[in-house]
Amino acid sequence: MSNQIEESGSNPVAGNADEGQHRRLRGSLGVWGIVFVVVAAASPLGVIGGPVPLGIASGNGTGFPAIFIVSTIIILLFAVGFTALTPYVPNAGAFYSYIGKGLGRVTGFGFAFVALISYLALEIGVYGLLGQGAQALFASYGLPSIHWGVWALAAVVIVTVLGHRNIDLSRNVLGVLLIAEVAIVLALDAVVAVTGGHEGLSTGFVTPSQIVSGAPGIALLFAFLSFIGFEATAVFRDEARDPLRTIPRATFLALILIGVFYTVSTWALITAWGDSRVVQQATDDPSGLLPGATEEYLGSAGLHIVQVLFVTSLFACILSFHNVVARYLFTLSNRKVFPASLGEAHKSHASPHLASGLDNIIVAVFIIAGIVIGLDPVTQFYTWLAGISTVGIIILLIATSVAVLAFFAARKRAGELDVPVWRAFIAPGIGLVGLAGVFYLVLQNLPDLVGGSTPIAIGAVVLLVVVFAVGAGIAAKRSEVTLE
């Protein structure tokens, strides 16, 4: 298939030029623009302050940085197959388009609904973290305590404005916020490395006995969850310059940068506290691990900066996932799954403005419901929704890996395999084994991930099964619903 054919096929709707123009998104995202969106979705500062202390406490302690290396390798192996299939998927739609290419239209749309629910759930859930973070931040400066929901709804308003505009504006905002949060963590890393930390440089991540100590499986779970969001490299296909080159490069660059950042920064955080006391500290006060280290090595000014950037990091994460959800709604509308009006791009901004608006309405309804019911913003509002997202996204990764193998197996049988065996079979096959192991760990520990509730854990799985059935059912009954 020639590049010319692939690019012309990226228009999701056949029709006259004017209609196609109004159903196409436009942007000038290059490799780094997409990387900003993806890495912001991963929320680097949020990960170092959240999952990392939990991984140290509940996982394998000082050996935790090595687990990030393992996680990075698993996802990079997945990405080898993912990007190998990219030239054959000439439309925006990310995982579900890839799954449909390898496993069929009906299956693809079933997973489209799983993806939509998973990302929407995570977007909504992070508003709980942001609301509590903003509440604590302003209260620390002696200002009156304002309910977390008010801060969350204020953030919805800002996201609404940014989502209505062209993706280039969001890229610029995300770029500024991302650079700021990464810079403060790298500053902490550098000071800790130069001073030698509390007990000298940590060696746990290169000590086999430490790497396999405790519960390395749980550590792998927390490390893997820190990468959620990298699918966005393909979601923004229509808004990328030269997507056949940009998407693969942005995918690998984002994953490598995230993996190296997490590994080095986790090692520095452990070094800051010292191998002999970091596990106990992380167990006693996980949320205080990063702030405590920051205050000790960067002073009170550094601590205040981290507190502010923690909130802006969560906002960047929300904005990234909002853009992903809006584009899912936009693309599915142009596939005739949802009302066609949601698939119209703004005449001036070339943004999915109606899909973006609908997403924000849904988010606001959930936030208001959480306020009325009286849910805790973290232990209930966030954890319940994040549990749904975690299971759904890992299922999507597994299904995409299977689709890659199936697609290239079919081409091999037809004598049309034009991709190296390493990219078509070996790398995605090994990655699939790793993903299956992670999925087993997720299911085994899902009740703990959703606040210790087995009924909610079961409900999360049932919900994903139901939405898959709905998506597949729509595609099966309506022949006009197509992947292109």
Image (cartoon, helix red, strand yellow):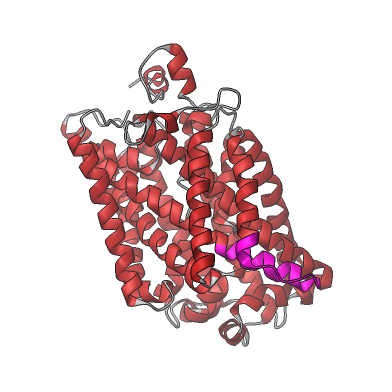
Please provide the residue range marked out in magenta: 128-150
Q: Quadrant of the N terminus?
A: top left
Residue 86 shows up from this direction: no
Residue 205 falls left or right of residue 79: right
Query: Image height check: is 156 above or below 440?
Result: above
> What residue appears at the point 35 percent right and 54 percent down from the top-left corner?
431
Q: How many marks?
A: 0
Residue 359 falls left or right of residue 175: left
Residue 434 falls left or right of residue 173: left
> What residue appears at the point 51 percent right and 47 percent down from the top-left corner?
361
276 in the magenta segment: no
**x, y percent for residue 159:** 61, 46
**x, y percent for residue 277:** 63, 87
Q: Main secondary structure of the magenta part?
A: helix
Query: Image height check: is 91 above or below 401?
Result: above
> What residue appears at the point 66 percent right and 36 percent down from the top-left corner?
169
